[in-house]
Amino acid sequence: MSKISRRNFNTLTAKGIGGAAILSATPFACALGANQDKKSLGIALVGLGSYSTYQLAPALQETQHCHLAGIVTGTPEKEKIWADKYSIPQKNIYNYQNFDEIANNPDIDAIYVVLPNSMHAEFCIRAAKAGKHVICEKPMAVSVEECDAIISACKEAGVKLGMGYRLQSEPYTQQVKKFVKEKTFGDINFVSADAAYRSGGNPDQWRLNKALSGGGALMNMGVYAVQSVIYGTGENPISVSAQEFSTRPEYFKETDETITAQFEFKSGAISNITTSHNFNANAMYVSGTSGWFQLQPANNYGPLSGRTSKGEEIKFPHESQQKLQMDDFAKHVLFDEPNIAPGEMGKRDMMIVEAIYESIAKGGQKIALNFEPGFGFGG
């Protein structure tokens, strides 16, 4: 994959793709030990696009164990807007030129990287070298090699690494896992998961630029579907076959529009996923030897909804998934509670994504997947 230079990314930004910039890939190593005595984890958001603006920042006003402590943005106009709205002191506001100086700021304990996918590895690694814990938005990176680099950097720096997998923390997903673990509906033999939306807006958005996104629907919504079939069966797949479909090549010029994939599991279960940027789909269905259950919607920001073959409704009070996710990571750092979505989970999913793309390139050939038992599962 070609690299994006600062000049190229600024050009893309001018076309409406983003508000960040690629900088030198050589951060200075300034290891600042994590402060384990705090009762609330100070988080800095890196990248102030729509997800940070409308989901993460509001959620950080509701969290119990972490708070919004700082921001990193390449758009100067946003600095005053965010500072005024969230009472962020000037000393906790950074840009991409002085990002590495965050190592010297004790107010900031963790960095949440919310940038285009191709920038995740660089800024996660730089955050780790600055001695800050790291939350990486999904997908973890644009390759398994980059995932390994992020994991290694965090281990070397002695900082915690978590994925921005909001669904891992919300109650509907926890209920699915409980059904599977307790065999409420018998042994699972089939799972179907769909995650898609129709993209019809700005054709210059970064998600449709392969150099920035690393891929299309699969790298974006497809990760949710992959996760669904894994916690819907309670195991990692052992093989995958996949197909790609394109009906709007004039719009999806560089990235995949629609992908379907079929998985096999050691238990004998099978599953299929569908993901797309060309239609709306949001569901998971799990069939066992003594019944079934489903979620629909299954992967949006909520509220989610579900039902079972026993005529029961799956229903929980709605809470911000992002709030739950960030509090879970903060409890992992502050109180040594389990890491619900560790970096290894992000790496596992990227291994599956790469296998899906390989299968497509080979005409739908079945690709073997080899995972150690439990690899990628949190806790």
Image (cartoon, helix red, strand yellow):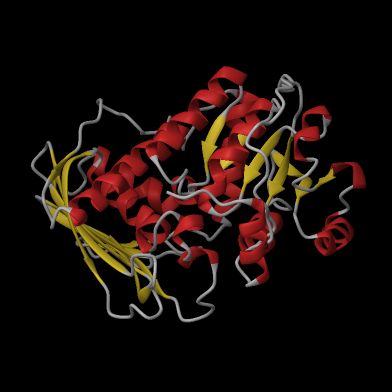
Residue 204's place in the image compared with 92, above or below, is below
User: Foreground residue, 272 or 206?
Assistant: 206
Left/right placement of residue 250 relative to residue 126 reads left
**Can I make out residue 191 in this image?**
no
User: To which quarter of the image does residue 100 belong?
Assistant: top right
Query: Which residue lies at the image location 61% right of the left edge and 51% below the top edge?
Result: 5
Query: Which residue lies at the image location 66% right of the left edge and 62% below the top edge?
Result: 49
Residue 175's place in the image compared with 53, above or below, is above
Task: Measuring from the top left, give residue 142's x and y in whole percent.
Answer: 43, 46
User: Foreground residue, 326 or 313?
Assistant: 326
Task: Measuring from the top left, give residue 226's x and y in whole percent.
Answer: 31, 51
Query: Which residue lies at the image location 61% right of the left edge and 58% below the top edge?
Result: 8
Task: Measuring from the top left, give residue 135's x and y in whole percent.
Answer: 58, 40
Residue 49's place in the image compared with 375, above or below, is below
Left/right placement of residue 90 relative to residue 105 reads right
Query: Which residue lies at the image location 49% right of the left edge and 30% below the top edge?
Result: 149
User: Foreground residue, 103 or 251?
Assistant: 251
Left/right placement of residue 151 relative to residue 123 reads left
**Can I make out residue 42 in this image?**
yes
Task: Measuring from the top left, give residue 316's x and y in whole percent.
Answer: 46, 58
Report the quarter where the C terminus lies.
top left
User: To which quarter of the image does residue 328 belong?
Assistant: top right
Count of all numbered marks drawn on residues in the image: 0
